[in-house]
């Protein structure tokens, strides 16, 4: 090995620059040890770490590259790299990689500054930055258009939980969502997405809607809210709420189902997950009657929920069979993963309530969707500013990939 050199090319982007440069280096038998390129608004930044072999002439390489750059109207700079510096760079490749995803309606410098300050203060170094959302026009009047930037960072954070807590605080203050994921093989190979149903895949709590139709809405809603905050045991709260629905006519279930709204982005998310080969599941403390409706409408693969006990065409106020509570949700996620022959690290779980936390924590990626603060903190990842389809950005999909 004779010379190591970092070649940095910048200027207005156009076709043929990389071809010209690499072709010239090929004439001298140069090895390219690393190469990276970024283009922002037609401004090119191209870097090549090269090794000039024994017998090669560094001066001749530099001279010809400078001439070629002049002919193309671009700049070319050279930085010598020492063997020690190269060895240090190679050793750094063993450090873990992380993905930090910043989501919102717009991305401001203040938001980026806050996120990158947390990154740097935890000893992580940004390797690359990618925009996953499309380019917004200047006269954009679409207030619902998402904005997403993905940071690829490298290093060993001292306290991942504390880092996520910092991101949650920034998210709450600035009205954005921030996710931190280890960038490993499992992150790039998720295969199953499991959803809670009530207030996650759909916009309402079904039991509250049934209660409204039965004239006991206020009593049931109060119990539901307390359960969602984690103040009541789910089994006890479910029993108390169902007892208030005793005598509810079965034919009214269909009428309630007709007016159950999906949450923002639900159809788009499930449609694209199916396109990309993911399996989907509803794992809910709600009711199978409504879960099966979603299965038919969206093409969900699995539905697990509570079955309403019915006698003489009326609800008895009880569950027929085993109750799907917090622990059962986690068990069902594990069971589905086993039946699909995939690792739990390849699963994603999305929910909004305290009873979803065991499932969210068991999954490879647990996402609290428009959830209470205690659930956001317990899950580690949260989406509050965008719709359910923002899950696609956490998987690394770009707008151009999504239908």
Image (tube, rainbow, N blue to C red):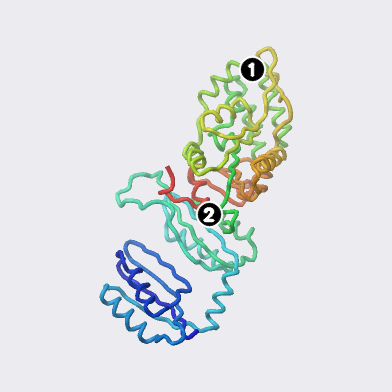
x then y, percent, for residue 279: 57, 40
x then y, percent, for residue 312: 68, 12
x then y, percent, for residue 15: 30, 64
Say which quarter of the image contains residue 330: top right
Q: Secondary structure at mark 1?
A: loop
Say which quarter of the image contains residue 326: top right
Q: How packed is label 1: few (under 14 Cα within 10 Å), some, or many (20 or more)?
A: many
Residue indicated by mark 2: 178
Residue at screen point 62% across, 32% down = 303
x then y, percent, for residue 56: 42, 85
Residue at screen point 44% across, 51% down = 398
**Would residue 346 be found to the left or right of residue 170 on screen?**
right
Q: Quadrant of the C terminus?
A: top left
Residue indicated by mark 1: 248
Q: Secondary structure at mark 2?
A: strand
Q: Is residue 76 above or below residue 18?
A: below
**Would residue 109 be found to the left or right of residue 288 on screen?**
left
């Amino acid at each position: 090995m004779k010379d190591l050199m970092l070649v940095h090319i910048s200027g207005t982007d156009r076709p043929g620059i990389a071809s010209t440069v690499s072709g010239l280096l090929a004439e001298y038998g140069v090895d390219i040890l690393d190469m990276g390129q970024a283009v922002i608004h037609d401004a090119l930044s191209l870097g090549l770490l090269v090794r000039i072999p024994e017998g090669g002439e560094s001066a001749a390489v530099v001279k010809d590259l400078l001439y070629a750059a002049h002919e193309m109207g671009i700049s070319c700079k050279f930085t010598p790299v020492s063997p020690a510096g190269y060895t240090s760079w190679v050793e750094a490749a063993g450090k873990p990689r992380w993905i930090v995803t910043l989501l919102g309606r717009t991305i401001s410098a203040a938001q980026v500054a806050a996120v990158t300050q947390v990154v740097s203060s935890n000893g992580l170094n940004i390797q690359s930055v990618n925009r996953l959302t499309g380019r917004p026009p200047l006269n954009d009047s679409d207030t619902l258009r998402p904005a997403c930037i993905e940071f690829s960072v490298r290093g060993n954070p001292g306290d991942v939980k504390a880092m996520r807590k910092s991101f949650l605080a920034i998210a709450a203050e600035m009205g954005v969502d921030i996710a931190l994921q280890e960038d490993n093989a499992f992150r790039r190979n998720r295969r199953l997405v499991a959803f809670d149903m009530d207030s996650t895949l759909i916009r309402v709590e079904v039991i509250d809607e049934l209660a409204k139709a039965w004239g006991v809405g206020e009593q049931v809603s109060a119990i539901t809210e307390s359960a969602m905050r984690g103040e009541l045991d789910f089994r006890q709260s479910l029993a108390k709420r169902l007892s208030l629905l005793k005598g509810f006519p079965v034919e009214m279930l269909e009428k309630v189902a007709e007016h159950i709204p999906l949450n923002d982005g639900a159809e788009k998310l499930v449609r694209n997950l199916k396109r990309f080969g993911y399996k989907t599941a509803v794992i809910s403390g709600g009711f199978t009657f409504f879960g099966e409706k979603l299965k038919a409408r969206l093409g969900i693969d699995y539905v697990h929920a509570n079955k309403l006990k019915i006698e003489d065409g009326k609800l008895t106020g009880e569950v027929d069979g085993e109750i799907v509570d917090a622990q059962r949700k986690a068990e069902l996620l594990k069971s589905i993963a086993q039946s699909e022959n995939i690792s739990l690290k390849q699963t994603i779980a999305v929910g909004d309530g305290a009873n979803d936390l065991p499932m969210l924590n068991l999954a490879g990626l647990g996402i609290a969707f428009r959830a209470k603060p205690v659930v956001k903190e317990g899950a580690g990842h949260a989406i509050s500013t965008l719709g359910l389809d923002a899950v696609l950005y956490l998987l690394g999909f770009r707008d151009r990939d999504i239908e």
